[in-house]
Amino acid sequence: MKFDLSRLLRPKSVAVFGGAWAENVIRQCLKFSFKGEIWPVHPYKKEVLGLKCYRDVIDLPSPPDASFIGVNRNQTPEIISQLSKIGAGGAVCFASGFAETSEEDVENKGDYLQKELVSTAGEMPILGPNCYGTINYLDGALLWPDQHGGRKVAKGAAIITQSSNIAINLTMQRRGLPISYIITVGNQAQISQSEIALSLLDDKRVTAIGLHIEGVDNPKLFEKLAKKAAKKKIGIIAIKVGRSEAAQAATVSHTASLAGNDAGANALFERLGIARVDDLETFLNALIVLHQGGPIFGKAISSMSCSGGEASLIADLTEDLDLQFPTFNAVSKKKLSDILGPLVHISNPLDYQTYIWHDQEKLTQCFSAVLECNFDLTFLIMDFPREDFCSDKAWEPAIKAIIAAKKETGSRVAILSSLDENLSEEKALKLLEADIIPLSGITSSLQAAIAVLKIGNFWNNPTFGDLLWAKWGERPTNSESEYNCKSLLKNLGIDTPKFKRVETKSEVLNGFKDFSGPVVLKGLGHAHKSEYGAVALNINSEEELAQSFEDIHRNKGAPLGYIIEEFIQGGLIEILIGFVRDPNHGFLLTVGEGGVLSEIRNDTQNLLLPVNEEMILKALECLKIWPILQGYRGKVKIDLKPILNTILKIQDYIVKNSDEIVEIEINPLILSKDRCIAADAIVSKQKI
């Protein structure tokens, strides 16, 4: 169901239900000079803060555009039901104690109440429950029961978060970021972050979107959002919590959304061109860059500072990032040399030193010479003195110079303070007026550049394709024996060793006669056979085979019998190919170094199905073992075509059987000069 959020987010009349928290909402509306109607609702109060109070929904003058429901969880569904029946525009459900408390709620009442809430709301949109609400800084409208630090703006970035407290903190930022909307979603019982963001993309005043995500409940909606955002050229920045086990536990206890698999989350955002960042500083810096000109489309950056220490610091911090400091072109280098004199070394990053610090004309010429190189982004590192007992008068020539140079060249430039506190909000706002990006914190600013570069690269080369995802049912899962797994792969046209299933010692020894070279004996019935001593390699005689059988039998390593197969010789490298159903993000493909040490080395890349050859190759190129695949130090170069074919054949099978297949893993896939052989495999299925 598609919900119309226009009245809820841009109301002309609001109804406010409840006691102290509701009174706070009214207080904030009055403080913000809300121009619409405000209708307090309380069973016995005559007025609230000088406004006439109404006893219940029926007494209201007309259906409100937006309502704040500040009563307890038991009363909330009934009020929502009444509002829906009279055609109200939408509501914020403030109360907690719904599905987010399912683990502690032994009566399961919270889950029941949340389902009742959604049912009674019908087609009326609701935010929450367990959320603060919304602030519209564009139109001066809010349903917000606490303080906030924002101001009215003409345009700006919209922020949607599952955490109300994080939302409050973000409104208090002093970096100059214009915020158009702050919206909290809590449990997302009815409307998800992605659906709200989809609606906001239709507001031309929204310049970027920031998401704080605790759990993805429907990646197809995120895919729809990403497509629309790319079309409208609106960048999306996301913080997704849940990398650690502790974070996942905290998330589940706080909201009804599961944090999900972090590898899947990364793959989802990469696939959709949503830039994921790890901290709020980078989050805000990236939104400022997107607001002031959108993403960057190349990795060429430059830096200017009047200190060699700052030049060295930013160079070091960029060393491991996908950013580059190209040399200045000959014309700019000559100009800089003439301006700065023979004692200044001309390089990027540039320490222009203090010889011209008070000379606005020469500073303008210096900055213009750098900006004329048309780097994708230029940083001017500049920390301002504290204002309580210092003067920043000496900084004025440099500020006027960079504004003039920006106007003259049109190149993108950011003033970057190395410390957050050394760039005031007042100065940040003035820089924005001059079309200069205000940033603070060198590390977070560089990470922000990486984030917006990912968006720019994605816009230039989008990888959209309908994600393979469904609301898969929770049914019993069975793991197939390796014999069945290899039989399946063989039927798909994937190269496997010659193999044969046997059960008794005599069958094992008789089976040996069917092989012309050394064999492998494996016990069936364990996912990790090496832990049970259930694998014997490179067996060359009946005597060795008999002993291997006895060893595996003694270790109880073959509860489902045995498989005897060809021992693959001449392997150059082993890789892993895994497909697993991720309920939160889609069907995940993992490629990486294989073998018994694969879990320790963790040299892997993750993609979401469907994939194509280009996407697989890019993933392989990101692996640490890529040089080996390319013939490191004179070794044989691996033919990658069989790897691609193996992945695509399994993908085709999964696409046709996605309701049944839970996991398919080949580890190792042995690569030799002329073969690509699935030496071991796991297949898990659900009965349908």
Image (tube, rainbow, N blue to C red):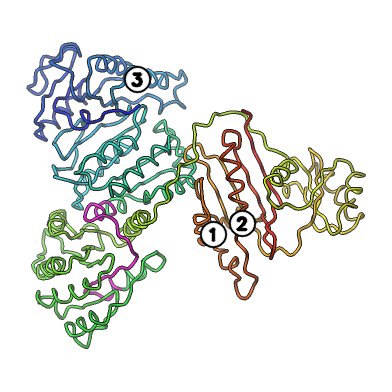
Most distant residue in the bottom direction = 342
Specify whether 6 is left or right of 466.
Answer: left
Q: Quadrant of the N terminus?
A: top left
Q: Which residue is mark 3?
A: 117
Tag nearer the camera, 2 or 3: 2
Instruction: Using the image as rendered, state which of residue 207 and residue 20 is in the foreground.
Output: 207
Specify whether 91 is left or right of 428.
Answer: right
Q: What percent of the width, then of the height, locates residue 2?
A: 32, 28
Q: Residue at x 21, y 40 (%)?
A: 203
Q: Is residue 145 visible?
A: no
Q: Quadrant of the C terminus?
A: top right
Check if residue 412 falls in the magenta segment: no
**Height in image: 543 above or below 232?**
below
Instruction: Using the image as rendered, state which of residue 292 and residue 102 is in the foreground.
Output: 292
Q: Secondary structure at mark 1?
A: helix
Q: Which residue is mark 1?
A: 620
Of the numbered discs 1 and 3, the one sitting upstream in the chain is 3
**Height in image: 528 above or below 344?**
above
Report the Cα–Cα distance between label 2 and label 3: 51 Å
Range of residues picked out in magenta: 286-311
Instruction: Using the image as rendered, state which of residue 548 and residue 404 is in the foreground.
Output: 404
**Residue type at tag 1:** Leu
Asked whether the residues under the numbered discs 1 and 3 touch, taking CB atoms below 8 Å apart as contact, a structural biologist would say no
Q: Residue at x 20, y 81 (%)?
A: 336
Of the numbered discs 2 and 1, the one sitting upstream in the chain is 1
Q: What percent of the width, then of the height, locates residue 24?
A: 17, 28
Tag nearer the camera, 2 or 1: 2
Q: Which residue is mark 2?
A: 643
**Residue type at tag 2:** Ile
Asked whether the residues under the numbered discs 2 and 1 touch, taking CB atoms below 8 Å apart as contact, a structural biologist would say yes
Q: Secondary structure at mark 2?
A: helix
